[in-house]
Image: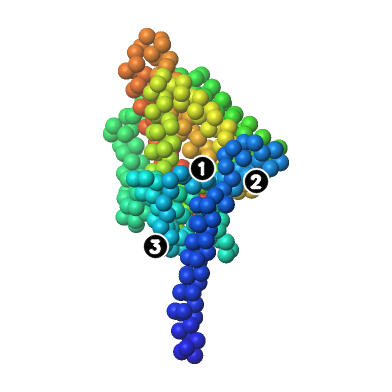
């Protein structure tokens, strides 16, 4: 029995890991040689029948960047992922090979700095986000600047209720239109969904899913706040609102297309609260940009409009806080 136990406990796992590394090495070599990735030109020139499959493959195996140097001799195994050191000029990073069912399901280059900061994946960060959330909610029920900003933001919504209603109807309407279009083009919608999945995989969001609800909630909030609300919300809204309005119009149409009930089925209802909360956060900052435009054009001045925008940005962050906790619970418990 002891020799058999040794084989099961030591030799077999080592052999499996070695096999996975070799499989990943072969996939990485084929990917660098251009054997796995369709070019963007091929995708754009493809027929309506071929385009969805090519687009999905493009999402799973994006073409390697030019000048990529790859070190296949120093692999690192993380679950079902094998990572190889790589660089493009002075830009260092790693080539990630995702293995499922004995084959490579995804290969991509992840530059250093694109992935989530390592500290966000620690238990301390999860507990810290929980304390931050509790403290923030507590201050909303106490005399504090946090409560005052909330009340001022709600007054702003009432003061511009017509513009706020229009922004909601227009952007939620585009989401609904995208969801309906997916019923007619389910394969293309699936390919667009794969593009979103590839982006989330590249930043390491899937890794956070195995770290518990607290860590996952913090990671979700960090990503949605920094990339969604701030970078593609507040920054373009500062330019008198129009860039944020146009950007979110396109984003909501694509979101609806990729997250349609045509693809999610019954899971759509489970995910609906997340969608409502997160999309409302981006609607708020878009609305704030339009208020900035209205106040500036109406003679009240850019400064007063900027305060209105910052109030909607604050309220949007609160919606993202609630969305992060629901989505983390949804992913960890319901799915």
Q: Residue at x 49, y 90 (%)?
A: 1
Residue found farthest to the left: 144
307 is higher (above) or lower (below) than 90: above
Residue 55, by quadrant, is: top right
Residue ID for mark 1: 274
Cα–Cα gap, marks 2 and 3: 33 Å
Label located before the other in sequence (1 or 2): 2
Q: Residue at x 31, y 55 (%)?
A: 124
Q: Residues within 10 Å of mark 1 (few under 14, many from 20)?
A: many
Residue 205: x and y, percent? Answer: 45, 50
**Element type where label 3 sits in the image:** loop
User: Real-space Cα distance between discs 1 and 3?
Assistant: 40 Å
Q: Nearer the viewer, residue 119 or 66?
A: 66
Tell me the residue at 41%/38% (across/down). 227
Residue 154 appears in view: no
Distance of label 1 from label 2 (alpha carbons) = 29 Å
Numbered circle sitting on residue 53: 2
Secondary-structure class at tag 2: helix
Front position among marks 1 and 3? 3
Q: Which residue is mark 3?
A: 74
Residue occupying the far top of the picture: 299
The image shows residue 91, relative to residue 165, as above or below, that is below
**Dot 2: within a 10 Å radius of its alpha carbon, few (fewer than 14), some, or many (20 or more) residues?**
some
Q: Which mark is residue 213?
A: none
Percent coordinates x, y for residue 293 in the rendering: 42, 17
Q: In the image, residue 193 lies at what x, y percent?
A: 58, 44
Q: Is residue 70 visible in this depiction of the protein?
A: yes
Residue 262: x, y in percent? 66, 43
């Amino acid at each position: 029995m002891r020799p058999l136990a040794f084989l099961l406990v030591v030799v077999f796992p080592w052999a499996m890991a070695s096999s996975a590394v070799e499989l990943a090495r072969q996939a990485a070599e084929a990917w660098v040689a251009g054997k796995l990735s369709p070019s963007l030109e091929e995708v754009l020139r493809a027929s309506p029948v071929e385009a969805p499959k090519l687009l999905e493959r493009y999402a799973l195996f994006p073409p390697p960047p030019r000048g990529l140097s790859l070190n296949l001799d120093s692999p690192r195994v993380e679950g079902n992922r094998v990572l190889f050191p790589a660089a493009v000029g002075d830009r260092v990073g790693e080539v990630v090979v995702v293995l499922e069912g004995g084959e490579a399901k995804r290969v991509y280059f992840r530059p250093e700095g694109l992935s989530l900061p390592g500290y966000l994946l620690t238990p301390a960060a999860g507990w810290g986000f929980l304390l931050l959330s509790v403290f923030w909610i507590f201050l909303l029920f106490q005399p504090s600047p946090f409560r005052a900003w909330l009340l001022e933001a709600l007054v702003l919504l009432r003061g511009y209720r017509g513009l706020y209603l229009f922004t909601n109807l227009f952007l939620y309407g585009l989401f609904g239109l995208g969801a309906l279009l997916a019923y007619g083009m389910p394969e293309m919608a699936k390919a667009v969904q794969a593009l979103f999945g590839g982006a989330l995989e590249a930043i390491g969001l899937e890794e956070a899913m195995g770290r518990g609800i607290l860590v996952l909630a913090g990671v979700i909030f960090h990503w949605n706040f920094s990339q969604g609300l701030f970078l593609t919300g507040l920054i373009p809204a500062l330019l008198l609102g129009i860039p944020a309005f146009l950007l979110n119009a396109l984003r909501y149409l694509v979101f609806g297309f990729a997250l349609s009930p045509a693809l999610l089925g019954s899971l759509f209802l489970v995910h609906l609260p997340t969608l409502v909360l997160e999309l409302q956060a981006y609607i708020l900052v878009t609305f704030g940009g339009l208020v900035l435009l209205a106040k500036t054009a109406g003679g009240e001045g850019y400064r007063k409009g900027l305060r209105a925008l910052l109030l909607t940005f604050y309220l949007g962050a609160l919606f993202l806080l609630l969305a992060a906790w629901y989505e983390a619970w949804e992913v960890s418990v319901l799915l």
